[in-house]
Image (cartoon, grey):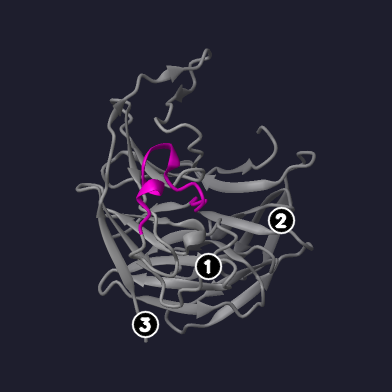
Amino acid sequence: MFSILSFAFLALSSPIFAAPVISQDGRFTIYDLPTPLAGPCDLVEGPDGALWGEDILVNKIFRLAPKSGEIQEFDIPFTTALSNNTQIPALNSGLLQDRTAFSCAIRTGQDGNLYASNGVRNQLVRINPTTKKIDIFAPPINNPLGDLQPFNDLTPAKGGMYLTQTTQNTFQFFSFADQSFTTYTIPVPASLPLGLKVGSDGLLYIALLTGNSILIFDPKTKSMTPVPLPGLAQMPAVVRAERNGYIYFSLVTGNGIGRINMKTRETEIFPSGRLGGLGAEDTIDKKGNVYLSFFDVDA
């Protein structure tokens, strides 16, 4: 029912023992990435306790050791959505390294590896935090146009990872056991599925950017239920927080945060009040506070 292409690479890294720059008020420590114009986009704590991230303006994964300040960079080898074995050496080195993937999602899998999106390449990247070995996997429906809106996302689940393909209007489950993909088509046409999160109830919640809905997927029954938002054109985007029976998500044009009740499935929206704000990502701290960042507002 599936086919898979995979290609393994030993990641090339350049350890940099960078001296952190402390801001004047002492609240922030700033680390400069070795690659200019890298565009660090998404961050996650790795199983090794280090901070891992993925760049959007150059196709690299980086690792920051908080105690020492050491930064390592790992090239995501250039391949195409049509062939995982296509490599262009000039695009895999130095300042010319691939700057056309626009990747922006990295999460820790329950198997102890890190997984990242590969932007418009429409692929899944796996990096072993110990050996730094990189594997690239192509979904079975390998549509080269499947992720032209490259801000897709992925989330850990029991036995695998879920990831979205925006312009293909699908999402996949990648199995750790046999490294296979299972593809599901979104029942809302042209919905641009973006952020997603597995809730504590075992259900998968997917933000449909242009579908103006949250799709609820039951892995046991395979049922999919789109739940519309109360306002028009809110553009739900990133789903990264759960608190007290609610799943929280960012709203781009809605300029705020939305949430869905995991039991009643009632949705609510909370505008930020920031003039002209375009919501980007949401997150939650250890105290249960939910935060929102913006694309265009310095807040």
Magenta residues? 87-104
Compare marks 1 and 3 and give the one earlier in the sequence. 3
Which three-letter amino acid code belongs to the residue tagged 1?
Gln
Specify whether residue 237 is in view. Answer: yes
- Residue 131's place in the image compared with 124, above or below, is above
Q: Nearer the viewer, residue 151 or 235?
A: 151
Location of residue 219 (image quadrant) = bottom left
Mark 2 or 1, which is nearer the eye?
1
**Disc 1 marks which residue?**
165
Main SS, magenta residues: loop
Task: Give the quadrant of the N terminus.
Answer: bottom left
Specify whether residue 243 is in view. Answer: no
Which three-letter amino acid code belongs to the residue tagged 2?
Ile
Q: In the image, which disc is placed on residue 269? A: 2
**Disc 3 marks which residue?**
2
Marks 2 and 3, how far apart at CA: 39 Å
Q: Position of residue 245 (x, y in %)?
A: 54, 60
Mark 2 or 3, which is nearer the eye?
3
On screen, residue 88 versus residue 15, left or right, reads right
Marks 1 and 3, how far apart at CA: 16 Å
Q: Going 74% across and 53% down the picture, which residue do you hit?
A: 254
Instruction: Examine the structure image and report whether residue 101 is included in the region drawn in magenta.
Output: yes
Q: In the image, which disc is placed on residue 198? A: none
Which three-letter amino acid code belongs to the residue tagged 3?
Phe
Instruction: Examine the structure image and report whether residue 47 is included in the region drawn in magenta.
Output: no
Neighbourhood count class around disc 2 (C-alpha, 10 Å): few under 14, some 14–19, many 20 upward: many
Q: Going 58% across and 48% down the picture, which residue do you hit?
A: 281
